[in-house]
Amino acid sequence: MGRKLFCELCPLFYEISVKKERLKRYIKWILDNNKYASEKGEGKLPVLLYSHNSLIRRKLGNVDIQLQENKATNLKLSAPKVNGILIKPGQTFSFWNRNINSF
């Protein structure tokens, strides 16, 4: 058996590792020059460039159907938060950026 990671040693160390990774992400946001999309548009946009529809739950060979259910749940939780966000030229979209979490 190989050496355990710091976060695997005990629950407290796991929490420390999570906080460390969050801090690294926040520092990266502060230091990078990216402009993150955060503005929500009002109503429908005047031009539709692309539309896509597909089945959320579908049989994929030997893949466990629970993974499809998890995907559906993730989409149900995330779609309302990102629906209507305008990504302007030069901006970056991020699920993790603090601007998104304010909606």
Image: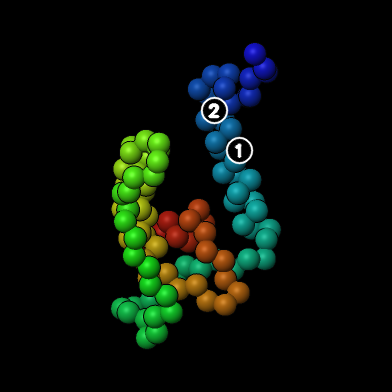
Question: Which quadrant does the N terminus fall into?
Answer: top right
Q: Nearer the viewer, residue 51 or 76?
A: 51
Q: In which quarter of the image is residue 33?
A: bottom right
Q: Residue 42 carries which label?
A: none
Question: Which quadrant does the C terminus fall into?
Answer: bottom left
**Residue at image x 39%, y 80%?**
48
The kind of residue on which mark 2 rests is: Tyr
Mark 2 residue element: helix
**Mark 1 to mark 2: distance in Å?**
10 Å
Mark 1 residue element: helix
**Residue at image x 57%, y 77%?**
89
The kind of residue on which mark 1 rests is: Lys
Q: Mark 1 points at which residue?
A: 20
Report x, y in % for residue 54: 34, 60
Q: Is residue 34 left or right of residue 88?
A: right
**Residue at image x 37%, y 86%?**
46
The furthest residue to the front = 61
Residue 77 shows up from this direction: no
> Mark 1, residues whose alpha carbon is within 10 Å: few (<14), some, or many (≥20)?
few
Classify 19 as above or below 45.
above
Report x, y in % for residue 66: 33, 37
**Residue at image x 37%, y 47%?**
71
Q: Mark 2 points at which residue?
A: 14
> Mark 2, residues whose alpha carbon is within 10 Å: few (<14), some, or many (≥20)?
some
Q: Is residue 33 left or right of residue 42?
A: right
Report x, y in % for residue 72: 32, 49
